[in-house]
Image (cartoon, rainbow, N blue to C red):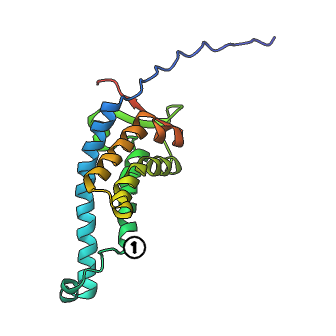
Amino acid sequence: MVMNIIAPPKPPLSRLSSAGLPRRLAAIVYDGLLLTGVLFGASALALGLAAALLGSEALKLHNPLTGNPFFSTYLLLVCFFFYGGFWIYGGQTLGMRAWRVRVQRRDGGGIGWWQALLRFLIAGLWLVPVAYLHQVFGVSVGLSLAAGLGCLLLLLALRLPDRGSETELVLLPKS
């Protein structure tokens, strides 16, 4: 005799609500301050290495880091690994933790490096007007910053980093 044993249905997973725009912006500001400190440290490390290799007198005459594409790439990688590392291992940067926000896949699991890279690149699009409006078109610095912040708000309001990387930012319950 074969018995059909049907497992009782699992209760539905409690769906976390999506993080709102003010909370996302607050986490961005918090993480921006932390990233500034990390970039200062990374720059000091590169400058110290340049001084050790070239000598301090040569460094006083000409700073080899100014306009150096390798140095710019190094700082970009530092930024990516700052965000990507936090997103991959725990789903939260320190700013996101302070504002109870977590990044996750749509099924609730953790994200991978490719998703982190997509999020990082799409979220970084707001820097394009900041960097190039002034240099290429001669627009004032204030106006290019305003255009960049407008792009940031548009990116966040449309949730383009979430859509492009198939992730979501959720609001965690109070503990």
Residue 138 position in % (x across, y down): 33, 61
In the rendered view, tell whether residue 96 sits above or below residue 67.
above
Q: Is residue 91 visible?
A: yes
Q: Amino acid at mark 1?
A: Phe
Residue behind mark 1: 70
Q: Quadrant of the N terminus?
A: top right
Q: Secondary structure at mark 1?
A: helix
Residue nearer the viewer, 71 or 41: 71
Residue 63 position in % (x across, y down): 25, 80
Classify mark 1: residues with Cα within 10 Å, few (<14), some (14-19) or many (20+): few
Q: Quadrant of residue 2?
A: top right
Residue lying at 46% horizontally and 42% vertically, measured from the top left? 161
Using residue 119 as the reference point, say whether residue 55 is left or right of it.
Answer: left
Residue 37 position in % (x across, y down): 22, 56
Residue 104 position in % (x across, y down): 46, 36
In the rendered view, tell whether residue 129 sits above or below residue 10.
below
Using residue 50 as the reference point, say whether residue 108 is left or right of it.
Answer: right
Residue nearer the viewer, 136 or 171: 136
